[in-house]
Amino acid sequence: MYGLKRGLFISFEGIDGCGKTTQIELLKDYLIEKKYEIIVTLEPGGCDIGKKLREILLFNKSFVSDTAEMFLYLADRAQHVEEVILKNINEGRIVLCDRCIDSTVAYQGYGRKGNIEQINLLNKIAMNGIKPDLTILFDVDIKIAQKRVGNIKDRMEKENIEFHKRVREGYLELAKENPERIKVINSNQEIEKVFFDLREIISKVI
């Protein structure tokens, strides 16, 4: 492994069906070939407690209030940071995280029309003083994303089109506000072209 005194923390964002999970796997294989030590994780569900919270958040059939939903995501994040993310970046690994702070702002803030200022404050607490070094936002047309998701959907994927439009708009607004950290990739393209664009961005930080 190439010697990294401190690892890198890279998060991947986008609406459901943007293709980020596929791209994370491609990037993992690419970086392993380059002899980097890689950890792939996700939110919610990147640790033992998080797996239980993921089940509640995405597959629970009973009512979950918007406020409770927000705090469950934040609880998952706080545990995930302590148990997985901090440990691995401090040991020099590259952490590839499927969703992180921006998801909560986009989904619970813009999508659910929550208080974004409060969410930003709570995100800072949950992150324990760190944030992603780089965030890749895979932007995709809503109709294309819906086709990619298919018929079997989790609780968030089942939300209406207007909800997902607000989430997408939220992500793009975040990218405008954080141009140094958040890099946008057109995910309407073929998988190979998206991955080419991803490699181009990653090559500038590794």
Image: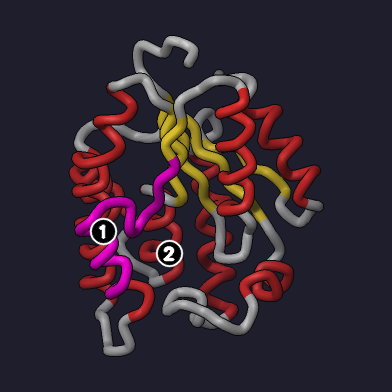
Label 1 packing within 10 angstroms: few (<14), some (14-19), many (20+): many
Residue ID for mark 1? 50
| Residue 153 percent coordinates (x, y) | 52, 79
**Between disc 2 and disc 1, whose residue precedes?**
1
Q: Residue at x 55, y 20 (%)?
A: 35
| Residue 118 percent coordinates (x, y) | 25, 55
Residue 118 visible (yes or no): no
The boundaries of the magenta stretch are: 40-56
Q: Which is closer to the viewer, label 2 or label 1? A: 1
Q: CA distance from mark 2 to mark 1?
A: 18 Å
Q: Residue at x 50, y 82 (%)?
A: 158
Q: Is residue 117 above or below residue 127?
A: below
Q: Is residue 195 above or below residue 15?
A: above
Q: Nearer the viewer, residue 70 or 21?
A: 21
Label 2 packing within 10 angstroms: few (<14), some (14-19), many (20+): many
Mark 1 residue element: helix
Q: What type is the residue that disc 1 sits on?
A: Gly
| Residue 29 among those drawn in magenta | no
- The circle drawn on residue 154 is none
| Residue 45 percent coordinates (x, y) | 32, 58
Mark 2 residue element: helix
When asked about the image quadrant of residue 26, the answer is top right
Residue ID for mark 2? 107
| Residue 44 among those drawn in magenta | yes
